[in-house]
Every structure is written in structure tokens, then in C-alpha cells.
Image (cartoon, coloured by chain):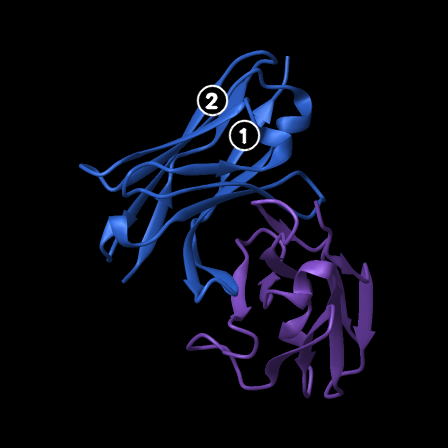
Amino acid sequence: QVQLVQSGAEVKKPGASVKVSCRASGYSFIRNWIHWVRQAPGQGLEWVGIINPDGGITIYGQRFQGRVMLTADTSTSTVYMEVSSLRSEDTAVYYCARDHSRDGVTWWFDPWGLGTLVTVSS
Amino acid sequence: SSELTQDPAVSVALGQTVRITCQGDSLRMYYASWYQQKPGQAPLLVIYDKNSRPSGIPDRFSGSSSGNTASLTITGAQAGDEADYYCFCRDSSVNQWVFGGGTKLTVL
């Protein structure tokens, strides 16, 4: 079945970087874009960015421009999200999710990874 | 950028019908998708492409859209439907995507 398996929890100090992975299986990796979404403790979902694994085109949320980098490795069917210059407000669960769309009028995510908790603390 | 606005909290009596709404200018151009999230779990797709349900989602969940408002309706709410619900759509003003703020559904 289609699965997205994310890497384990991370604890980082302010100013450091973190790289979270999302390995896809059960479908042709290059067929679907992958989104990243984050959720701070007790807060709602926030869209981070999207990557096309076939060619590496990326689009980032305005809040994440310049501080988040998405990459893809087609040899391992894995997408990576690197967040630099971490601050306490980046403490959150980060999810990857497979993109679906129709005719440029609607988008949806299915499935989602289980999430990776990134804690930023001195 | 555009925003999607949801009521923070909604309640419904067991077995009754509840509508959760999502408002935003982007919804005049694009259809929303809807996600259910229970505590400690990843979000789960419940409605996509305006009013389609993934396999395994009960038919008591339905979606609709009119003007700048998308709606998720649960007909005959069950205790297991208690969760946070989020709408999602492409932003019509910038090349990004956006979530609504979420609605916490309580089943009484």
C-alpha cells in the first residue's frame, strides 16, 4: 500500500539546522508532488512547502522562504526537508503528504506521514 | 495572501447533523479538501474534489461549495467523529496553499 515513512524525532539547539526525511513506497515516486505541513503544539496545520520529485521544482510558504529547503532523491524515493536557523517557534510536528490534484482546481493530501517531532530548545 | 476562516469550535448532539464551514476568496476559484485530526494522530483526508470520499470514510460525511464558502456536513454525528477538522485550498492570490484555522467538533 502507499506509505510515507518519516524519520524520527529530533532535538536541536537554537540556531542549528535539522533535516527530516520522508520515504515513499507503494507508488511511482516521481508521479506525485510531496507537501510538507507543520503543527506547533496545540496549534493548527500550517503549509510549509511543496516539491516535485521529478525535477526538484519547489514552492515555499512565505514564512519559510530562505529558511526551508526541500530536496528529493529519486534513487531512494525519499524527500528531505531542511530547516535552518532554528528558533523555539519552530518546535512542531512536521508532516509530509502526497499531493493529488485535478484540472488545476482542487488539491488534496493522501496519505500523510505519521509526523516528525522537532524540538528546539537550549 | 488569502486566508481561510473556520469557526474555532462547533458542537452537535449525538445523531444530529452538523455543518462545518470554511470561508475565503480562494474558494471562489478552487475546491477545498477536508481533513479530520484526532489527538496524537496525523490528519486524515475525509473529503476531496468538492464532494468525494476516500475509501473507508463513511457516507455521513459530505462536502459542498457555494461562492466563497466550502462546507463539510456530518449527517448523524457519532462520538468517534469528535475531532479537529481543517479545510485546505490553493491560495488564489499567491502561488501557495493554505489551511483554515481548524474547527474543534464536540459531540454531546
In front: label 1 or label 2: 2
The blue one among the chains is: A
B95 relative to B28 in the view: left or right: left
Q: Residue at x 51, y 72 (%)?
A: B49
Query: What SS does tag 2 mark?
Result: strand
Q: Nearer the viewer, residue A81 or B108?
A: A81
In the displayed structure, would residue A37 be above or below residue B33?
Answer: above
Q: Residue at x 64, y 31 (%)?
A: A63
**x and y percentages locating residue B86 in the rendered image:** 65, 60
| Label 1 neighbour load within 10 Å: few <14, some 14-19, many 20+ | many
Residue type at mark 2: give it: Val
**x and y percentages locating residue A116 in the rendered image:** 48, 38
In the displayed structure, would residue B64 be above or below residue B9?
Answer: below
**x and y percentages locating residue B55 in the rendered image:** 41, 77
Residue type at mark 1: give it: Val
Query: What SS does tag 1 mark?
Result: strand
Q: Residue at x 73, y 51 (%)?
A: B3
A26 relative to B93 in the view: left or right: left
The CA span between labels 1 and 2 is: 8 Å
- Which residue lies under the disc numbered 2? A18
Name the N-terminal-most of marks 1 and 2. 2
Contact, mark 1 vs mark 2 (Cβ under 8 Å): yes
Quadrant of the frame with the C terminus of chain A: top right
- Which residue lies under the disc numbered 1? A118
Q: Nearer the viewer, residue A112 or B67?
A: B67
The purple one among the chains is: B
**x and y percentages locating residue A10 in the rendered image:** 48, 26
A82 relative to A4 in the view: left or right: right
Asked if badge 1 and badge 2 are on a common chain, one would say: yes
Q: Nearer the viewer, residue B90 or A81?
A: B90
Using the rendered view, name the quadrant where residue A52 is placed: top left
In the displayed structure, would residue B50 be above or below residue B102?
Answer: below
